[in-house]
């Protein structure tokens, strides 16, 4: 069975990096592939957690070809618990991501499972589910999903609020119309990282510029260099509507951290293109 796992995991590696022999799934014919998927499904109840994770990710590597495993994968995903938020954003998140790869974007079974996860008493599951729904291979959140995410903006756990805000930024149509007032309210969150995610979600739609830009300008003075970089990135998202931020961005050209200065120059180029032609040295 370990050989089966190893060959499946190698199937995710580009041919230039790994010699895929005839045993690699996807090249052994549909009958053998189905037997391999069946074998992996049988292995899912393995008592060892790290081994279960390998099995789940092996199925995820096969994507929709592992569709027969969907019921078992979703059941396992809901049954497993996290050991806190950090674990929830690693092992739990990886299990959810693998299940999403097998289900395909927008599969109603996967979406329904994610909604249940966002309502879980486990903060690791809530955080991971909200984050997974914001990944690029997932569709824009439907109104029913957005409604749950809006509720998570008031969650007691910082990472849950942050993930919910980021994913809401990907919504559109009626879902976005419902999300925008809640995001504007969430600009008052006590946590600066949550506020940055809320601001980024609004910037994606160039919404709330009069409230967002002044707040993000203040973030340029943060003692956290990563937050300063994010602030510059958000201002750039607003484009020419963020001209109010130009003085602060010009000053930020002198930031002590190179990756912050790089993002500041990019923002200046988006807000006032002539500025980018004369970068500070």
Image (spheres, helix red, strand yellow):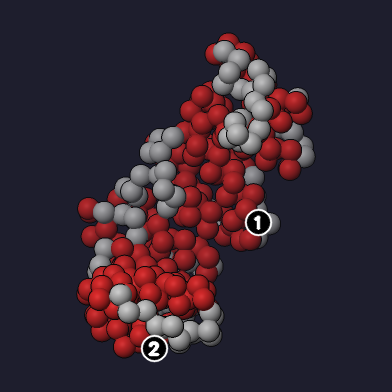
Quadrant position of the N terminus in the picture = top right
**Residue 72, relative to residue 224: is it above or below?**
above
Residue 157, given in percent of the width and then of the height, sits at: 54, 67
2 or 1: tag closer to the N-terminus: 1
Q: Residue at x 68, y 38 (%)?
A: 54
| Left or right of residue 56: residue 127 | left
**Considering the numbered disc 2 on the image, is that residue within a helix, a strand or a loop?**
helix
Q: Can residue 149 be seen in this view?
A: no
Q: Mark 1 points at which residue?
A: 87
Q: Which residue is drawn at 48% across and 55% down?
A: 131
**Considering the numbered disc 1 on the image, is that residue within a helix, a strand or a loop?**
helix
Q: Residue at x 76, y 28 (%)?
A: 2
Q: Is residue 189 visible?
A: yes
State the CA–CA distance, disc 2 to disc 1. Answer: 39 Å
Q: Residue at x 44, y 50 (%)?
A: 135
Q: In which quarter of the image is residue 264?
A: bottom left
Residue 228, given in percent of the width and then of the height, sits at: 46, 78
Residue 194, given in percent of the width and then of the height, sits at: 46, 71
Q: Quadrant of residue 272?
A: bottom left
Closer to the camera in the image, 83 or 262: 262
Checking the image for residue 60, the label placed there is none
| Left or right of residue 255: residue 28 | right
Within 10 Å of disc 1 (Cα), the crowding (few <14, some 14-19, many 20+) is: some
Q: Name the residue under label 2.
A: 251
Residue 242, given in percent of the width and then of the height, sits at: 26, 77
Q: Which of marks 2 and 1 is in front?
A: 2
């Amino acid at each position: 069975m370990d050989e089966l796992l190893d060959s499946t995991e190698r199937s995710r590696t580009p041919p230039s990096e790994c010699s895929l022999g005839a045993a690699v799934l996807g090249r052994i014919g549909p009958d053998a592939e189905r037997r391999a998927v069946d074998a992996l499904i049988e292995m899912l109840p393995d008592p060892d957690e790290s081994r279960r994770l390998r099995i789940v990710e092996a199925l995820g590597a096969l994507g929709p070809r592992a569709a027969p495993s969907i019921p078992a994968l979703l059941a396992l995903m809901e049954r497993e618990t996290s050991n806190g938020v950090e674990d929830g954003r690693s092992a739990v998140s990886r299990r959810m991501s693998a299940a999403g790869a097998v289900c395909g974007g927008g599969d109603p079974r996967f979406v329904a499972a994610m909604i249940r996860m966002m309502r879980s008493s486990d903060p690791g599951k809530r955080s991971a589910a909200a984050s997974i729904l914001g990944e690029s291979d997932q569709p824009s959140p439907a109104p029913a999903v957005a409604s749950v995410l809006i509720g998570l903006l008031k969650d007691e756990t910082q990472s849950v609020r942050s993930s919910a805000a980021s994913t809401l930024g990907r919504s559109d149509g009626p879902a976005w119309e419902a999300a925008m007032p809640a995001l504007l309210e969430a600009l008052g969150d006590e946590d600066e990282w949550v506020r940055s995610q809320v601001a980024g979600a609004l910037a994606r739609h160039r919404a709330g510029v009069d409230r967002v830009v002044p707040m993000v300008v203040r973030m340029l003075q943060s003692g956290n260099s990563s937050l300063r970089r994010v602030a510059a990135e958000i201002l750039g998202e607003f484009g020419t509507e963020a001209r109010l931020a130009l003085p602060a961005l010009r000053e930020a050209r002198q930031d002590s951290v190179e990756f912050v200065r790089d993002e500041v120059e990019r923002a200046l180029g988006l807000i006032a293109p002539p500025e980018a032609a004369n970068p500070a040295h």
